[in-house]
Amino acid sequence: MSATIKIQRGAEFTRILGLGVARGELAVTNDEIAGPIDSSDEWIRSRTGIVTRVRAVPETGVIDLAEKAARQAIENAGIDASQIDAILLSTITYPHLAAAGAPVIADRLGLTVPAHDIRAACAGYCYGIGQADAMVRAGSAQYVLVIGAEKLSDFIDPTDRSISFLLGDGAGAVVVGPSDFPGIGPTVAGTDGSGAPLVAESNTWLDIRDDPSLPFPTLRQEGPSVFKWASFKLAPVAREAIERAGLTPEDIDAFIPHQANIRIIEQMVKQIGLPESVIIAKDIVDSGNTSAASIPLATERLYRDGLVKSGDIALQIGFGAGLAYAAQVIVLP
Amino acid sequence: MALSNDEVLAGLAEIVAEETGIDAADVQLDKSFTDDLDIDSLSMMTIVTLAEEKFDVRIPDEEVKNLVTVGDAVSYIAGAQA
C-alpha cells in the first residue's frame, strides 16, 4: 500500500432542525366509506379509533404532498434549500417502477443532490431518521431532508375490509443536521420477512401481466396478525431505543408511534410500560393511517394542540409492511 | 405439569375479564367468543397472546379462527401443554 485514502468526518451530534407537513385536502368520514364494506361509524371507531381520514384530491400527487412538507421543513429549519445535501424519501405509493421519487423532489427544490427512496413502508420515516443521523455524523452530508409521503388513496379498494378504510394521504418532512447536543438517539431497527405476506398488494404486477382480467393492485392486510405483532412484539424494540439512548421511560415526554390503529397504540403503551405522564400521539383519530407520513404528521399535531414543545424528548417507532420496524428517541425541534 | 381443563378455564377467564371487563363467571365453556361474549378480532388476538404467555403455549394465528368457543380455546391450550 503506497498511499492512504483520506476519509471525512462529520458532526459529533445531530438533531432534527425543522418539521413540515402536508395533509390531504379532504376529511373523509366513516359514514362516507362504511357502505361498501357493510360497516358503520361505530364499528370503525371501536376497532381503529378513526373518526376521519385525510385524503388528497385527484390533482394532488404524492410528490406534491412531499414537496409542500419539504419546503415547510426547510423554512422551519432556518436554512436555505441550497444547503440540503441529500434527500431520503420514504414512500410505498410513488407510482413508478424505475426511477425513485426523491430525485423529482430534489429537482423541484432546484437541487441535484443525492436523492433516493426508502422502501420500508410504515417504518420508513424512522429508517430515514436513522440513516440521516448516520450520514451527518459520518460527514457524507451536512443537512439531510427526510420525507415520509404517501398517497395511499391511489391504492385502496372501497370494498376491502382489511386496510383500505384506515388509509389517508399526507406527507411529513424534517431536516436533520449538525447539533451542539445529542438530538437523535441510536436507531433500533429490524425486519421479519417471514411476515411479508401479512401486508401486501392484492395482485403483483406480474400477476396482472399473466392475467389481465385481474383488478388494479390495492393494499391488503391480515389485520389481527399485524395487530398481534405490532402490539406485543415491538415493545422490546421501543424499550431498547430508550435504553440505548441512556434514558428511562420516565424521561420520555411524548410517545409518537406510527398511527396504524388506536388499539395498537394503546396496547403498545401498556406493553412498553410508559408512565401516565407521557403524552401519546393519537393523530390517527382525524388523519387515519398515512403510513410513512404518520409519525411526522402526528408530531405536528402535538405541537398544534400545545401538548409538546421544542426540546421535549420523544420516542418514535415505525412498523409495518415488510415486516419492518425502527425506533429512536429524539429531541423535538 | 400440565394444568387441568378447569384450571385452564379459570386462567383464561381471568384474562378475558381483564381484557374486556366481562365477569369471569360468564366465561363458560359453551360461550362463543364473538356471538356470546362480543369479543372482536383484535381483543381475541390480545387474549390469545396473553394466554400464550400465561400457559406457555403457542397458538398460531391461523388457529385462532378455529377457537370459536371458550371450550375450543381451553381444549387447544390444554392439548398444547400436554
Image: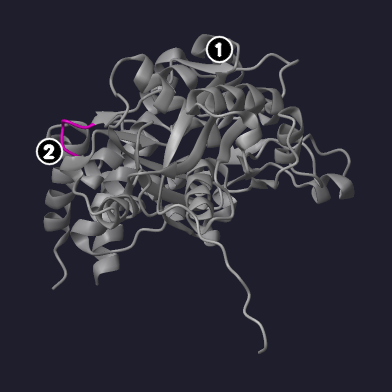
* Residue A186 image point, x, y percent: 37, 54
**Residue situated in front as seen by the camera: B66 or A313:** A313
* Residue A253 image point, x, y percent: 24, 33
**Residue situated in front as seen by the camera: A308 or A286:** A308
Q: Is residue A119 above or below residue A73?
A: below
Numbered badge on residue B24: 2
Task: Please rate how many residues cluster around mark 2, counting C-alpha atoms within 10 Å: few if below 14, some from 14 to 19, many from 20.
Answer: some
Q: Is residue A68 above or below residue B55?
A: above
| Residue A49 picture quarter | top left
Residue at coordinates 63% horizontally, 39% vertically from top-left?
Answer: A91
The answer to whether one can see residue A159 in this image is no
Residue A252: say if magenta: no
Q: Which chain letter goes with mark 2?
A: B
The answer to whether one can see residue A314 in this image is yes
Residue at coordinates 75% horizontally, 41% vertically from top-left?
Answer: A112
**Residue situated in front as seen by the camera: A86 or A223:** A86
Q: Is residue A216 above or below residue A24?
A: below
User: What residue would you read off at disc 1?
Assistant: A28
Q: What residue type is disc 1 on?
A: Val
Q: Quadrant of the C terminus of chain A?
A: top left
Task: Please rate how many residues cluster around mark 1, counting C-alpha atoms within 10 Å: few if below 14, some from 14 to 19, many from 20.
Answer: many
| Residue B13 picture quarter | top left
In the image, taking residue A179 as reference, residue A117 lies left or right, namely right
Q: What residue type is disc 2 on?
A: Ala
Q: Which chain letter goes with mark 1?
A: A
Q: What range of the chain is rendered magenta?
A: A274-278
